[in-house]
Amino acid sequence: MTRLRVLAVAYACNPTRGSEDAVGWGWINVIAQQHHVTVITADYNRQDIEVAGPASSSVWSNLQFRYVKNRSWHYSPWGKWARIEASPAKPIMNLAYTNWLDHALRLAETETAASEFDLVHLITYVGWRFSGNFYRLALPFVWGPIGGLMNTPWRLMPALGLKGATYYTGRNLVNSLQIAFLSGPRKALRKADGAVIAATSEIQSALSTHFGSGSRVICEVGAPDVGIVEPQDRTPIEPIRICWSGPHVPGKALHLLLKAAALIPKESRFRIEILGDGPFRKNWHSLAQRLGIGDRCTWHGRLPRSGALEVMKTCHMFAITSLKELTSTVVVEAISLRLPVVTLNHCGMADLVTERCGIKVDVVSVDQIIRDLSLAIMRLMNDETMRRSLSQGAFERSLDYSWSNKLASLNEVYSQALTSCNGAWRETAGSRQ
């Protein structure tokens, strides 16, 4: 493919942060490997991008940034907004982010009036309901990675507790109504005309079922550059160290791991290294004490990314218990660090984790999940040959998720956007090739 001029919209885009900020930063750097990218992003990213960006990007010369001025009512992922996001008041956050998208569109209109672009690509946030109005620009439109379409399985509601079940029941109902009635995403998908990126195979299926939209699966996260990591040896008398990482909120469901660990015979040697923090930390800490495994848990709290990776490097396996997720960044980090993964067999983990690199637990009932998680941990605890084999497989699997491997698939999506014929704006873009 020839070099393109791409206008990228990535509200979340930061070289120093994880989660969606890392998604945005990773994607624009992938695009810039071959194309020139002008990025519209939130102003709160400016300092980190200007200070850390050049050192964090091998393609800095292909990147330009345009910042949407922060307004007091604009969403930002910390402080009061972090508390709102984790509460029933989350629709307020959605309105604030939608307002940011409106301001970003005005900036995009200014950019397209002043410079020629070949296409516009909406990257983050990955939520399907936040299509903005960028499809109205007189340019080919690419959208994705897209997530957020899946409802939390009703059979898992008992695992969430009263507060969590109330929140996710409300989300399921609202999500279903929005799938049925929101017009913006439908218009955006029609404009993209197949130039759509689904974050997981589940999302790809949902896009086809609900909207009749074709899409290509490209995982939203990529493997970090962690250098050469040697596998962790484990002696027969050494406790197996299990790593768990994430916000301490109901949907991450650490309590499932704690209850599974409590089923392991008392004479077995294990430790759980717990990363992250949040409103449910106190509840889960108390649960560990009641289950009799409190002395086997280390609560590290929220560490800088470098510190969290150092803790992960000391572990022998990784467990993720999320009840709703796309493909968690931390799971890709785990396999990059040669950690076999024990996970629920759903969401993006169903795509990522294979029999080469971990054990997937089917999602049938809460009691069954707890029991099977416990059995999976004991298999790795009692079979070091198997654990070492999965450790090597984890590293090999991480290579499939390298950021550089996304470029070929992304270029195919861009070709789809440029060659699909349903408007004069495509003819204009084609004349500039």
Image (cartoon, grey):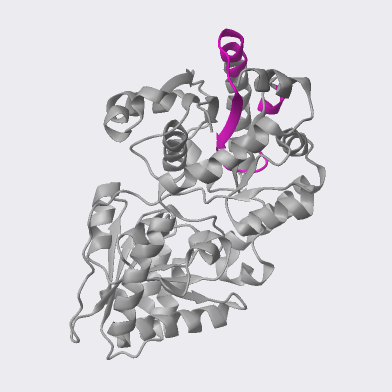
Instruction: Kindly identify the residue that appears in the image at 66 percent across and 66 percent down.
Output: 153
Q: Quadrant of residue 420?
A: top right
Instruction: Kindly identify the residue that appears in the image at 36 percent across and 23 percent down.
Output: 61
Instruction: Kindly identify the residue that appears in the image at 32 percent across and 23 percent down.
Output: 50
The correct choice, above or below, for 164 with respect to 297 in the image is above
How many numbered discs?
Answer: 0
Instruction: Kindly identify the residue that appears in the image at 77 percent across and 30 percent down.
Output: 421
User: What quarter of the picture does the C terminus occupy?
Assistant: top right
Report the side of 369 relative to 279 (left or right): right
Report the side of 405 relative to 102 (left or right): left
Q: Nearer the viewer, residue 25 or 80?
A: 25
Query: Residue 173 location, x and y as percent?
Result: 74, 54
Query: Residue 148 location, x and y as percent?
Result: 62, 50
Query: Quick check: is 71 in the magenta stretch?
Result: no
The correct choice, above or below, for 254 with respect to 260 in the image is above
Q: Quadrant of residue 263?
A: bottom left
The correct choice, above or below, for 194 with respect to 352 in the image is above
User: What quarter of the picture does the N terminus occupy?
Assistant: top right
Q: Which residues are magenta?
A: 108-136
Q: Is residue 131 visible?
A: no
Report the side of 28 relative to 335 (left or right): right
Report the residue that reaches farthest toward the top.
Answer: 114
